[in-house]
Structure formats: C-alpha cells, structure tokens
Image (tube, rainbow, N blue to C red):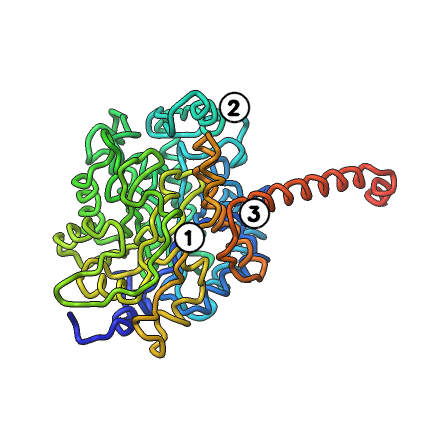
C-alpha cells in the first residue's frame, strides 16, 4: 500500500495522454437523462441547467454526458439527445455550447458519449417510418425470455434487424465523426465515449454473436475491430489533442455460447491502448441476452451499509470486471483504465444489464482499486443520481472518516410489480425507471427521492401521459378554433 490515505488516493489529479488534467479520480458516468424532446432532440437546456450544474458543482474529476445518439432515426429510448445533421448550424450549436458551459461551469472537464443502438433501437424511438427496421452488422434478432408472449412482444418492439450494407457503415462512421466535431466546436473537453459496450452498434460489430459478416468488417477478430479502428483514426484526424478521445468496451458478452470472449476482448483493449490515439478505456461487459454476468439482480440486492477496510493482504473487490482489469494491467500500458463497478445506467433496452449489482460504494473500495493498479479512474452512476454531490460532501471530504465515507445503502423498492409482468421486454426495464424518474426530478430542480417505488413511478408516468394527451387534445381544439385561425391570419 502507498503512504496516502484513501481520501488522498482518489483526490490525486491525473493527466491523460492528450494533456487534459483531471482534478481527481472520480468520474460521473454516462447515464441517459431521457429529457430531450421532439422533433430534433436538441440538448434540453431548461432541464440541463439544473441537472448538469448540480454535477458541475460537486467536484467530480470528470463528467461524461448521457448518451448522445448520432442518428436521429435510431434512438435507444425516446428522450435521448441527438447530434443530428443540423447540429453544427444555428440555433442548434448554440444549445450545445450552452450545455458545455453549464457542465464545465466549475472547472470540471466534461466529455460527450456518442452512441448508436443498432438492433437495440425500439419501434417509436427515433424519427423513422414504422416499417423501417433497426440495423445490425448481421440480421440477428434479440432473444429475451421464453414463450410466445415474449417473442411476440420482442417482435413488436425490436423486430428483426436488417443487415447493414457498406453504405450504411460509411454513413454511421460519418455520423460519429460529426458528433465528435460538434462536441469539439461546442467547447466540450472531448468525445468520450465511443460506446462500444452493452450490445450497442459498435459492440455488435465487435461480437461474433451479432457480427457474422464475411467482408472487411467481419469474419475474424481483426475485421470485427475494423469499424472501431476506423472511427478512432477518423475522429483523431478531425479532433487532435488536447481533445480527449476514449472508448467504452465490453470485457466479454457473458453469453453461454457464441459471444465475445474475454480473450478477444483483451485483444481489442490491446489495440486501443497501443494505438497512441486513445486517452482512456472504460471496462464494462454484457449485452441484452447475457445470462452469466455476475451483475444480475442488483436492483433487488441492497448495497453495502458498512465500508470495508484497506489492508496490504486483502484487496477490496467492490467493482465488477476487476479480474479482467487485472489482465489489462499485464499489457503494461500508460493509457488509464476506468472501472465503473456496474454502478451506471445505460439504456432502457439493455435488459439484463438493468439488473447490475451496485459496484463502487465506499471510499476505501475506490482507493484500493487505484492503489492496486487495477484502474486509474472510478466511475459513479447510480450514486451520482441519488447523491449527486457525493464527491464534495463525502468521498473527498477529509472531515468524513473512512468508516462513514460511502454511498447510502439502497435498494429499488416495489420490484414485485416488475416481476408480476410476464413480458420480460417490459418488466425487466421497469427498475431503470426509478433512476430516470430521479434524473427528471433533478432536471426540474428537485432532490432525488430514494424511497420512490416502481408502482408509484409507473402510476405517475400513466398520469402524466394522460395529462399530456389531454393537453395536446385541447391545444389542437384551440388551434382549430375560428379565433385562433383569425389570429394567425392577422
């Protein structure tokens, strides 16, 4: 062990290869805020003024935005921010610039996560015709749950994706590059992350389960990596240092057969840390169909209520994927590694990942991971929603003892309601609504409500849907009235 205390270890600054210096090791992980609105899903500044200013004032070392989708036709959930084709034009780019200013208002750097859901884009999420199928490297539909009811629901929600043509791949590459340029022009510190995990499109290219191509983008581990390599190179050409570029990767798919293995995942990391273009790599794992990840059923497991002690003889393993991160250590690279411990939110449709166990919770667990060399950065996701100011008030606060320096012990209440729903595509996504609900509260200038339950959130959502539906109906009636028509003519 080092001579530093736990608080001092996580408070150490870190300079990335691009030259960007992070003031400490705590990272606010990317979580979908689901606050953007149609038709273009620009950054919702009225909500982000509250949400991101709260994170900006809380002394994180780095803030990563929620997912920004690069193709307005394919969202992973309605409410994602989109970097659309007009994003570099006014008035849209001004909204991006304001977002960057809010998020970095207290000196903490903020970088943008860019994503494309691929086959995980459900019907109704995105501006595309009803008959337009989602895309995938190969036409491999999602399988989730047994029985005709689950299959029928999946067919209606996700359907069978179409295999991407080379022109589709070129278009996707251009979309990601545009996203990076928009982030740079807006004044963000970088384009992290290229989202290559959790069964999203880049992850679909990297996995032999969803990539069964036999052209330049599939057929071998090297070719499955081709699109990610292309993106890293093309983005770096447009956005050289000190612009930060990072990648989020799966350590494995954690499927019984046919998915990405840890050995192939390690080779992908090996290229990233050796290419001299990437500033840090985040390690994650799993996809919509995995059944063997250790992170299952976490919303039903109460997080720890007592902080573990640091010692030389026994390492604290709060985070998942720690074993894989230790294998990455063997690559002897200077590129920093981030572990998020499963303590993040990704997408409403990464079904099995919605049952991740809580990861990093205590100051000592975080410090031990850094001290052991397993990782350099600590990602906080769920904690950043329930206790957005936890770096400032607890983890980096020297007046709080190690024994007391941990996130609140928590469990999502009312999961019996989700378990009663026979359709997994619906039931398994309900627990995530607890965190979306609390991010909406933060966006509205309210505090998070750790005691909210799934049934109450579902009821409030139904009520809001009915209310907004009635509002739209009355608005249409009013707009069609002779008085409104006369005003328009005047």
Q: Quote the CA–CA distance across marks 3 and 2.
A: 34 Å
Front residue of 456/440: it is: 456
Quarter holding residue 94 = bottom right
Which quarter shows the C terminus?
A: top right
Q: Which residue is mark 1?
A: 411
For image coordinates 36% across by 24% down, the residue present is 139
- Indicate the position of residue 452 as horizontal and vertical percent values: 52, 53
Q: Nearer the viewer, residue 123 or 333?
A: 123
Q: In percent of the image, x 45 and y 29: which residue is there?
A: 158
Task: Locate residue 409 relative to residue 206 in the image: left or right.
Answer: right
Task: Please report whichever mark, 3 or 2, sits nearer to the chain's N-terminal start.
Answer: 2
**Residue placed most toward the observer, 212 or 158:** 158
Q: Please, what secondary structure does the residue beneath circle 3 have?
A: helix
Mark toward the start of the polypeptide (1 vs 2): 2
State the residue position of label 2. 131
| For residue 147, side relative to residue 256 (left or right) | right
In space, the residues marked 1 and 2 are separated at their CA atoms by 40 Å
Query: What percent of the width, then of the height, locates residue 173?
Result: 37, 39
In terms of depth relative to the viewer, which is nearer, 408 or 381? Answer: 408
Q: Secondary structure at mark 1?
A: loop
Q: Count residues near mark 2 (Cα–Cα under 10 Å), then give few for <14, some for 14-19, many for 20+.
A: few
Q: Which residue is mark 3?
A: 456
Q: Residues at badges 3 and 2 in contact (C-beta under 8 Å)?
A: no
Answer whether residue 164 is visible to the viewer in this image: no
Q: Secondary structure at mark 2?
A: loop
451 in relation to 419, above or below: below
């Amino acid at each position: 062990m080092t001579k530093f205390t736990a608080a001092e270890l996580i408070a150490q600054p870190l300079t990335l290869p691009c030259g960007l210096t992070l003031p400490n090791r705590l990272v606010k992980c990317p979580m979908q805020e689901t606050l953007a609105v149609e038709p273009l899903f620009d950054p919702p500044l009225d909500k982000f003024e509250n949400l991101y200013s709260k994170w900006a004032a809380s002394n994180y070392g780095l803030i990563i935005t929620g997912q920004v989708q690069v193709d307005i036709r394919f969202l992973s959930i309605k409410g994602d921010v989109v970097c659309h084709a007009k994003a570099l034009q006014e008035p849209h780019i001004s909204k991006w610039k304001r977002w960057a200013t809010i998020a970095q208002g207290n000196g903490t750097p903020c970088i943008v996560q860019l994503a494309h859901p691929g086959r995980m884009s459900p019907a109704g999420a995105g501006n595309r015709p009803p008959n337009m199928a989602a895309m995938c490297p190969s036409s491999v539909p999602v399988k989730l749950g047994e029985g005709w009811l689950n299959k029928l629901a999946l067919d209606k929600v996700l359907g069978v994706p179409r295999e991407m043509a080379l022109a589709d791949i070129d278009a996707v590459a251009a979309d990601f590059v545009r996203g990076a340029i928009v982030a740079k022009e807006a004044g963000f510190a970088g384009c992290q992350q290229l989202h290559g995990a959790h069964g999203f499109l880049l992850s679909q290219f990297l996995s032999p389960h969803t990539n069964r191509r036999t052209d330049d983008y599939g057929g071998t581990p090297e070719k499955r990596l081709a699109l990610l390599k292309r993106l890293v190179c093309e983005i770096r050409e447009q956005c050289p240092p000190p612009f930060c570029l990072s990648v989020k990767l799966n350590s494995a798919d954690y499927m019984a057969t046919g998915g990405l293995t840890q050995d192939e995942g390690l080779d992908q990391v090996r290229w990233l840390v050796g290419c001299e273009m990437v500033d840090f790599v985040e390690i994650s794992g799993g996809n919509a169909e995995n059944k063997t990840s250790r992170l299952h059923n976490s919303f039903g497991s109460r997080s720890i209520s007592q902080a573990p002690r640091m010692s030389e003889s026994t390492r604290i393993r709060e985070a998942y994927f720690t074993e894989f991160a230790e294998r990455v250590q063997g690559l002897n690279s200077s590129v920093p590694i981030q572990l998020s411990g499963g303590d993040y939110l990704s997408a409403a449709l990464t079904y099995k990942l919605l049952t991740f166990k809580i990861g990093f919770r205590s100051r000592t667990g975080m410090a031990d991971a850094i001290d052991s060399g397993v990782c350099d950065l600590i990602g906080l996701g769920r904690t950043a929603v329930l206790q957005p100011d936890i770096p400032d008030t607890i983890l980096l606060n020297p007046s709080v003892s190690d024994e007391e320096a941990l996130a609140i012990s928590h469990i999502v209440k009312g999961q019996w309601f989700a378990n009663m729903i026979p359709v997994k595509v619906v039931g398994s996504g309900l627990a995530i609504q607890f965190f979306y609900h609390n991010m909406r509260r933060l966006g509205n200038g309210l505090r998070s409500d750790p005691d909210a339950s799934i049934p109450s959130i579902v009821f409030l959502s139904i009520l809001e849907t009915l209310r907004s539906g009635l509002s739209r109906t009355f608005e249409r009636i009013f707009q069609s009235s002779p008085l409104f028509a006369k005003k328009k003519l005047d």
